[in-house]
C-alpha cells in the first residue's frame, strides 16, 4: 500500500512528524503557483491522482 510519506510531493512537518503537506504546482493561464494541502503521513495514497513514488 502506498502512503503519502512515499510521495515526492509530501513534506513532513518539523513539529509533528505524523502530519505534513502535499505540495503541488498549479498552472493557470495567468500564473503558476504552489498549493499546499495538509495530510497525514500514513494516509492511503493508492487512489491519489498526483502520487509519484520517491
Image (cartoon, grey):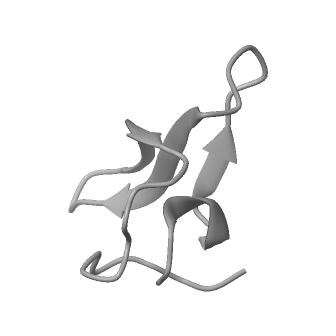
Task: Using the image as rendered, state which of residue 27 and residue 41 is in the foreground.
Answer: 41
- Above or below, 16 relative to 4: above
Residue closest to the far top: 15
Q: Is residue 10 above or below residue 1?
A: above
Q: Position of residue 41 (x, y in %)?
A: 55, 48
Q: Residue at x 45, y 41 (%)?
A: 40
| Horizontal and vertical percent position of residue 49 | 27, 81
Judged left or right of residue 25, residue 18 is right
Residue 27 lies, with reference to residue 6, above or below; the image says above
Query: x and y percent of residue 21 in the render?
Result: 52, 39
In which quadrant of the rendered view does residue 27 lie?
bottom left
Residue occupying image coordinates x 50% and y 54%: 42
Instruction: Tell me the residue at 26%/52% (across/down).
Output: 30
In the rendered image, the residue lying farthest to the right is: 14
Q: Is residue 18 left or right of residue 24?
A: right
Asked if 19 appears above or below 28 in the picture, the reply is above
Q: Position of residue 23 (x, y in %)?
A: 50, 49
Question: What residue is at 43 percent from the left and 46 percent from the top?
Answer: 33
Relative depth, front residue between 2 and 20: 2
- Give the side of residue 9 with respect to residue 33, left or right: right
Q: If the image is split into quadrants, where does the C terminus sit?
A: bottom right
Q: Nearer the viewer, residue 53 or 34?
A: 53
Amino acid at each position: 500500500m502506498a502512503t503519502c510519506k512515499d510521495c515526492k510531493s509530501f513534506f513532513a512537518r518539523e513539529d509533528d512528524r505524523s502530519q505534513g503537506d502535499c505540495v503541488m504546482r498549479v498552472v493557470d493561464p495567468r500564473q503558476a503557483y504552489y498549493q499546499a494541502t495538509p495530510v497525514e503521513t500514513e494516509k492511503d495514497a493508492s487512489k491519489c491522482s498526483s502520487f509519484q513514488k520517491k
